[in-house]
Image (cartoon, rainbow, N blue to C red):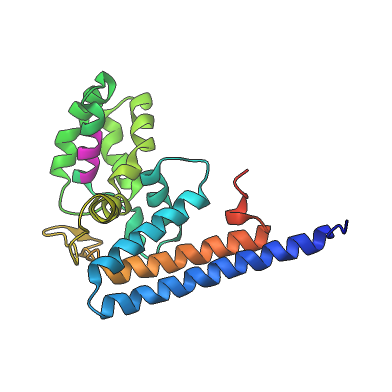
Amino acid sequence: MTTIPDDENLQAKVNFIKAFFDDLDNRIAFLGDLYTSGRRDEARVLSSCYIDGLASALYWPEERNNFNFVRALKEYGSEEIFRYIHPKMLEDALLKKAANNSKWKNISQKISPTLQKARGRFYDEQEITNLLSPLLNKSEMGDVQKELWRGTFAAIVYSQVRIPAVHGFGPPDGITFDKTTFKGQQVPAIEFTMLKNSLKRIAGAARGESLNSKKWFGHDYE
């Protein structure tokens, strides 16, 4: 029986990785054709699902789809705003945690009035920390900091695009933010171009991780 040398096995694996990402690049490019041909819902749905799939693969074995999706957009997406926090989104997320949890109920009662007054623009993490830390003790603030991702623009993309795409009939075209600013400017709409550009960057990062390490998504799921 002939034994294939390890270096040949490794090169075959690298070739397979390249072929996978070449095919993914072709599928991403096709999304533009799909969108311009009038199949806009399908293009947005597929874009969000591809981001979701790549994020789950990159951050395996973390199994929180929403956390992975947000992390991928924040780390590799094409928009700075992905990392910024919407006070109402954060308040709503923490209120959900407070529904059956006395600790989070107490935290929410302390910070909700301040978050409500802060509406109207997006904040970076340090600004939110500075806003809330006088209202909480050190332990409570530490808990809140671990959950700030739930209030980010990237989390809004997940809740307003990815979830409707998978569990409903797709998101609307061009979600906008009335009376809310980002660095003094109108908040960019969540639309197909934003999703596709972010998807391309995430796919490029996943390709790089895979080829540089010669392991699928940098870890080979082990």
Q: Which residues are magenta?
A: 89-94
Q: Residue at x 34, y 77 (%)?
A: 32
Q: Quadrant of the C terminus?
A: top right
State the image coordinates of residue 104 (x, y, percent, origin top left). Answer: 26, 25
Q: Is residue 118 above or below residue 186?
A: above
Residue at 38% x, 31% y: name it.
142
Q: Nearer the viewer, residue 107 or 211?
A: 211
Residue 219: x and y, percent?
62, 49
The image shows residue 181 at horizontal and vertical percentages of: 19, 60
Quadrant occupied by the N terminus: bottom right
The mark total stands at: 0
- Extreme residue toward the right, this view: 1
Please state if 39 lies on the left or on the right of 17 as rendered.
left
130 in relation to 25, above or below:
above
Which of the 4 image quarters holds residue 113?
top left
Name the residue located 39 percent from the left edge and 76 percent from the top edge.
30
The one nearer the camera, 5 or 142, is 5
